Amino acid sequence: MPRQDDGAPDTTGLTARLMQAAVSALEQRQPIEALPSLDRLRLLPGQSGIAAALRAEALLALGRSAEADGAAAEALEANPGDAARLELRARAHWACGRSLEALDMAAAAVIAAPQDIAALLLFAALLGEERRHEDAVSVLQDALRRRPGEPQVLLRLGIALTRAGRHDEAADVLGRCAAAAPQLPGLAVARAQAALARRDMAEAIAIARAGLDQAGGDAALYSVLAHALEAAGRRDEAWPAFRAASRLAPEDPYLAHLAAVADGIATERASAGYVESIFDGYADSFEASLIRLGYRVPGLVRRAVERHRPDGAPLGSVLDLGCGTGLVGVALHDLLGVALHDLLGASLVGVDLSRRMLDEARAKGIYTALLQQDLLAALEDGPGSFDLVCAADVFCYLGRLDAALALCARCLAADGLLIFSVERGQDGAAFQLHRQGRYAHAPDLVRADLAAAGLAPLEIREEALRLDFGRPVEGLFVVARHAG
């Protein structure tokens, strides 16, 4: 190996070859091929920082998020003020599910390099992840002033405006983007989603179909097309699109569940990923939507508690399964006998799979604990001391109820109440998975599962739970306690 004047080996040529091999592999989307070169590069004098940065990129592409985060931290330590490395660490945090830390790191990248469009786009995306859509719009408008007419900025701004509910502005911005770069990846999806958001189903369908004609198979376009067809009342046309979307994105639990519905597969429950994705996306508009749909269950729960505690005895501890944004908690919290901040007395515990829903519930300030868990896991962990276990419109995402009801019984105090609602199925038909992706339960099945769990029904009432596509959703409202 050649030596420098000071006698040290000259590694310049080796450094260049290793760097070129790693960068070439990354550019050719072969990240696994880049790692051996990067492992050697990091051992050469002065190369550990750049090798760690490139290694983080490769690991992110491979989905090895925790390792990527460690490599990004090493790269940033070698050059703490570098905007590109701050941005890299932000992306690694995001891939690890640490969106708030990612947001802080992206903000630091913007401060370090205010003109860096990539940093601004990442910062705006993370603001959107935290549902700070108006802040994201402001950041992207600033980016557009710095880079007028930049298609990628126009695309991201149009998406942010759609999510902020500013539909006319979104249509204008996305139209400008289409004029500047009609083939831009993601544009057809954004335009179709924007049309869907402003309830222009004909335009959403037309844009999605045109995008599919141009780009071929695309899961997101098929998904938007399916939702637009369903919203237009063309369900028979929607199901093939749901199937196609799921085939193209088999790892997506939301699409997998809807494809199972389309295929008539009798699954026993909706997957946790499906439920979480629905309600994370629904959190911002959840309460307003339910009000429009005439949602009655929280009021039914309140009145049932009053009926079955006629002496006015206060409630002790309450477990609110699938608490959502806290509507049942609002209906019940003043019935608890001890101030909610006194954890030794009454408590109101909410459980939900959706972090977004829990954020909304937390803002109400009425829960003593909020747990992001699957309801069966929460019941398995729960103590047997709740005065009330409530599941308002939650069991519609379970087909089989026997395990859930047995666990509810285990969590009830001796004289505790179980209150839940389900969508009503036909007698003798067990449970059915409807094309809305929810389950309906036959009254005789509900009675049999209660009995098997050692629970006796105090009430099984037929009630209209809410509206769906303008029609009442017929349900069963159930109050039960330990038998005997």
Image: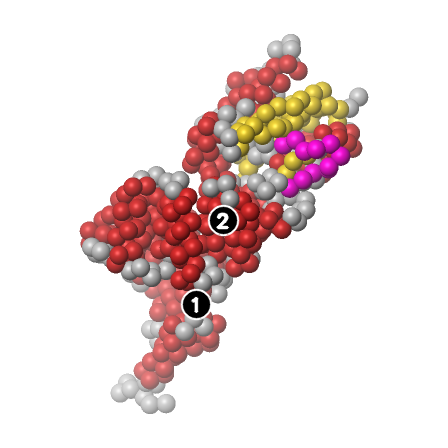
Question: Residue 35: x, y in percent?
Answer: 46, 73
Q: In the rendered image, which quarter contains the C terminus? A: top right
What segment carries the magenta color?
A: 420-433
Looking at this rendering, what residue extends furthest in the top direction?
Answer: 311
Taking the spot 27% from the left edge, 49% from the top edge, the residue there is 173
Circle 2: is it few (<14), some (14-19), or many (20+) Cα within 10 Å?
many
Q: Is residue 415 visible?
A: no
| Residue located beneath label 1 in the image | 58
For marks 2 and 1, give the one nearer the viewer.
Answer: 2
Secondary structure beneath disc 1? helix
Q: Amino acid at mark 2?
A: Ala
Q: Return the residue at label 2.
A: 226
Amino acid marked by disc 1 = Ala
Counting from the top left corner in percent of width and height, residue 95 is at 45, 55
Compared across the picture, whether 33 is left or right of 5 comes to right
Q: Label 2 to label 1, Cα distance in Å?
A: 35 Å
- State the colouring used for the structure image: secondary structure
Front residue (pair 227, 173): 227
Q: Write down the quadrant of residue 25 in the picture.
A: bottom left
Q: Are marks 2 and 1 in contact (CB under 8 Å)?
A: no
Quadrant (top left/top right/bottom left/bottom right) for the N terminus: bottom left
Which secondary structure, mark 2?
helix
Q: 180 or 31, which is in the foreground?
A: 180
The reply to whether residue 423 is in sight is yes
